[in-house]
Image (cartoon, rainbow, N blue to C red):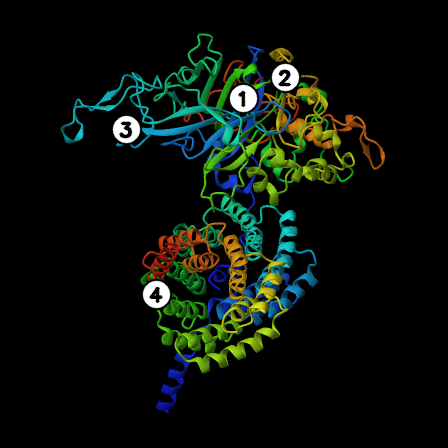
Amino acid sequence: MKEFRTGIALAAAILVAPAMFGASHREAPITAIDHAADITDFFAFVAYDDPTKVTFIMNVDPFLEPSNGPNYFPFDPNVVYAIHIDNTGTGTAAVSFEFQFTTVINAPAVFTGFVGAGAGLTAPANAPGGTAGQAVIPPAITSLSGAGAAGFSLMQTYTITMVTGSGSSAVRTDMTNGKTLIAVPSNVGPRTMPNYDKLATSGIYYFGTYNDPFAADHRTKVFAGTVDDPFFINLGSTFDSLNLPANAYQTDLTNSLGIPLPVLSASQDASLMNYAVDNVAGYNVNTIAIEVPISMVTVAGQPIIGTWATTSRPQATVIPTTSTQPPNSPVGYTQVQRMGNPLINELIIGTGDKDTWSMSDPSGDSTFANYDLNPLLANVLNAVFLVTVPDPPRTDLLPLVNYTGPFAIAGNTGGPVADLLRLNTSVPPTPAAQRSRLGLLGGDPAGWPNGRRVTDDVVDIALRAVAGALCSTCTAGGAPFDASSVAALGDGVNVNDVPTQETFPYVAFAHGGTTTNHQVPAPASVTNPTFCSPNCPQ
Amino acid sequence: MKVIWVILISSLSLIAAPTLIEQRIDASRQAIQKNGKDANAYNELALALVRQARETANQARCVEAEAPVAESLKISPSGFDGRRARVAVRLCEKRWADALEEATALHNQVMDDVPTWGYIADAQTALGDYEAAGRAVQWMINMRQASPQALQRGATLREAYGLNEPALDWLTSALRMTSATDVEERAWLLTRIAKLNRMMGHTEPAEDAVKQSLTLVPDYPWALTENALNLVARKRYSDAVEVYQQRQRVAPSVAGLYDLGLALASAGKSEEAQREFAEFEKQALRLVNQPDNANLDLIAYYSGAGKNPQEAVRMAQDRLTHQHDLDTLVASAGAFAALGEWKEAGQQMALALKLGAKNPTWLVEAGRISRKAGDDTGARKYFQQALEAAPSSPISEEVIQELVHTNASSL
């Protein structure tokens, strides 16, 4: 009977979809289009002010221009934003926090999402249509709800669901327990939002433990909204095939082909100044931050966790039993993107595999192990700058993708290859004065790759690590590799354009729409940079 | 002189404009003429010939596509696009296992390539691994939501799982998304829509879809076949004969001889039917060991008019060693039934229906087999399902009679 055959492979013509190429902070082709689901950064670290707590921050939706009204930057209500924690060394989520947003438009007839001025403005005597005396502009927005929120039209509330276990045995607990959580909008400007920092601070919500949301100890904190993007990088030069500008480096070194070497001097490396353009300066990003007791996400006696963030969208399925979804995906959703360690998808995974990587579960990352063990970026550094890099396989990079080295778990042989941001929660936070932007490479045990803080210079750390800075027994061309030869590589951008906070949510609040300032081009002289942050030389 | 001009102009108007696919073939050939080392032009030519194979229902085009692919790979031996074009040619030639092997290798090289996922799905569907095919199509949807190519393939799988309305939904969406200029693709989709509607007993929408298909592409072979099947379902056998004959004139095929024979037999023209069957058998036997064969129809023939059930069973079992798609399982069930091996036939039918396919013809056959095997409960279940699958179908009266018969025999 030929009934069925007409449906089959003669339909196998023959669409050749054009290849698509994305850029960093939009690191995979699919998230170059789906910006609302694009995870820009993911952070995890022991809370600065309480070593019994751990903070997770996921940032999404890159390059938000602060002045871009009238709707600014809502989270996507169709996306489930989630943070996952593996506390068993198996590369699978034992605990997850899912965030979902709902948009409410309070003043649908008003053309902008946010409006307000002083104590409010009424129609003057010469108002059209005999409306003199009627309220036209509400008072300035000074609160997220109630009095002071009359002009807050485009509002988003959100829920938090804690998920323990996965699949059919997952237990889902609503953490909000009836509390209304409001996402903090972008900083429109001083007339509309005259005291923005206070407004943003009011978006920090406190909870008890997950099984007692109203416990007086308020051990859980959460914040969602638009903030300053804490990522800093000379993005343009990096992706111009590593065309890092010569005038950023005081060392003034070149290779035999005359190409400037991106090597920072000792003083540059130690400074918190920028010697090249931070292309992310002045932009906002959407953030979701949650701080919970360490005991909530670890098992007793085992302080090491692996963590990652995901975004997922509702998805049509071919047939009900066909599943390509990671086990931690919300039911009926498909994963769009994930992030554990920074810069993996951007700098390590090939463009032809980025989307598959984004949509797959980290526990299956052995499929991509060749990228980790033989990163093309090392070859590029070698080709562009003629720096010597270690021979593959790069087992020195393995602690980034399994539980070995500083993340070894007793009784665990390493677990699967899985890109998770691993954090040893028993390592206390480093006080601000002793903190190094270079994390473990700078002798700071609480920095990346031991978790990731908002001030960690992951670009410089990654450049050095890929070039071999973590090597102790590597070879290069058969001879012992000298890790110190790559110990000062950098892009010339050492610090964020604005100071981050020392308390939750740690990121700086949003740039204002009327004071947008993206940094000007490169300084004329490295000894006298025309821009620097946060402390300019006198 | 004026007369000559009128004749010339009239004859010009009778020359059909080249189809989109013919234009693509021309453009590729011109590109190759300009630059004989243009691998991409060879790939485009191969793919256009594969499309033409479907457009004209002429498998010879698949073989013709081998040459440009070979040329492309000579120029660029590890070229991804060339290798992918070769997969398309393998699928065209029905070399499913070869296609799957190469497509899998391509996928491992570039995991995000959506067309490669599509080819994997096609090969897996043909081989009968519907779960693997479903995963492949799901990846297509995950990566490039709502592409017509993903939706079409998804519709095929939904049909296998008995999700007929959702399958129709996706085919309709695919049709909406297909460009108005790609008339053959639209005609193909309309034919598939017609077939699903016919299966669900929606004869008027089925007829309407076939008419639209034939308006877009006059004498479109697939639409002609579907039209004939629609007529057979409505017991208009003489009309079906005419359409099958037209189809054979437009795009002669071995399987078409068998279809024509069946229609002739149903129309009471047994001598003519026997002639067609004889010719069919002769030509089908020549192709038995080729990838593009008519073995399914040969199995059906030997199970029925050909009166050689042992050979039918042997051929079916041999085919099942290579692929276990639903059509093959159903054919195998028919072969065992022809041999009177009702239990075995029932088991094959149960396998075919295991995923949940709601094809009323198959369900009725399953019911009859169950009754012969002494399983009246099973028979009733299948007949009931057939009625539910297509309550207003021309087959429904027959099903009700079967139910009555089954109930009577159980008393």
Residue beneath disc 2: A303
Report the disc number at residue B207. 4
Q: Amino acid at mark 3?
A: Ala
Tag 2, which chain? A
Q: Kindly report the distance in space between the C-alpha atoms of the residues bearing marks 2 and 1.
A: 16 Å
Q: Chain of mark 1?
A: A
Q: Residue furthest top?
A: A216
Residue B360 image point, x, y percent: 41, 58
Question: What amino acid type is highlighted by mark number 4?
Answer: Glu
How far is the residue under mark 4 from the one under mark 2? Answer: 68 Å
Q: Which mark is residue B31?
A: none
Both marks 2 and 1 on one chain = yes
Query: Would you say A229 lies left or right of A75 here?
Result: right
**Residue picked out by circle 3:** A107
Quarter of the image with the C terminus of chain B in it: bottom left
Mark 4 touching mark 1, by CB under 8 A? no
For mark 4, name the chain: B
